[in-house]
Amino acid sequence: MIGLENIEKQFGDLTVLKGVTLTMEEGSVTALVGPSGGGKSTLLRCINLLEIPTSGAVRIGEDRLEFRPGQRVPTAAVQRLRRQTGMVFQNFQLFPHRTAIENVMEGLTTVLKWPENRARERAMSLLEKVGMAHKADAWPATLSGGQQQRVAIARALAPSPRVLLCDEPTSALDPELAQEVVDVLSDLAREGTTMVMATHDLRLASTIAREAVFLDAGVVVEKGPAQKLFSDPEHERTKRFIATLTHEMVSDGEAI
């Protein structure tokens, strides 16, 4: 289970998260949606402490960390919680000087100190899972955006994290390449992988998310079952946002 308790995050005088409290069950897929600047990516990065909350508490499984303004959290505690997460970034962030399989192996050999043979076997099995085994020895620069993102997903899954965090995983891709990533994430969802994703891609969110959270100006405006929130939201602000996304998809010739 992932628990966020009264999370606040400030950058200088700007408060981007204002008392966010959420619970995400193991095996669930939760979509964080909202306008740009609404706080969804910052909230995602607070879960794995790439951004340290100004105040509040984060729980992943049995590990729980509290944060208070001006109080430093021990590095070892941050790393222990962070290692329970895998992160997929908007722009892939593969190492350009490593092949696909070496990118997937990197964390296993350098952080977890796995023997190279064991790491290679694990990496190849994950590349097979995401349909990239045939590109194991390819350099990132030779791969399409969709292929790079699938390698990045394999890398995030390599240490068997408790939760997979995805920050706008399809936003840098055209619709055809994005579908490759949607298909992989859909397979992971069916397998029971716990996921939290920040996205404005309504197709992705409506396809695989069980729960959805609408954030605006750092506040949770509405949350609930994804299909209901996307098709019949209660709050007027949510309705306007969903209508905008739906209009964009229709304009692009897509359907939910």
Image (cartoon, rainbow, N blue to C red):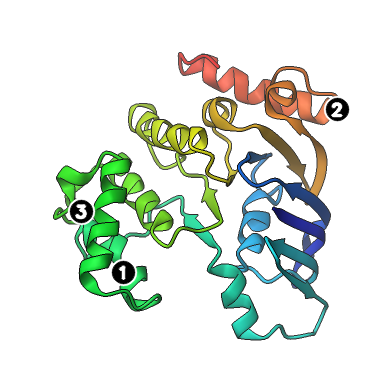
Q: Position of residue 141 (x, y in %)?
A: 20, 53
Query: Is residue 184 rendered to the left or right of residue 102?
Result: right
Disc 1 secondary structure class: helix
Q: Residue at x 73, y 39 (%)?
A: 213
Q: Is residue 67 above or below residue 230?
A: below
Q: CA distance from mark 3 to mark 1?
A: 18 Å
First-in-chain label (1 vs 2): 1
Residue behind mark 2: 235
Q: Residue at x 53, y 50 (%)?
A: 167
Q: Quadrant of the C terminus?
A: top right
Residue behind mark 3: 141
Q: Are marks 3 and 2 in contact (CB under 8 Å)?
A: no
Residue behind mark 1: 106
Q: Is residue 67 above or below residue 221?
A: below
Residue nearest the viewer, comparing 133 with 9: 133
Q: Position of residue 246 (x, y in %)?
A: 61, 19
Q: CA distance from mark 1 to mark 2?
A: 45 Å
* Type of amino acid under label 3: Ala
First-in-chain label (3 vs 1): 1
* Type of amino acid under label 1: Glu
Residue nearest the viewer, comparing 159 with 253: 159
* Type of amino acid under label 2: His
> Is residue 115 shown to the viewer in this render?
yes
Query: Is residue 124 rendered to the left or right of residue 245?
Result: left
Q: Residue at x 52, y 45 (%)?
A: 168
Q: Position of residue 225 (x, y in %)?
A: 73, 29
First-in-chain label (3 vs 2): 3
Q: Quadrant of residue 245?
A: top right
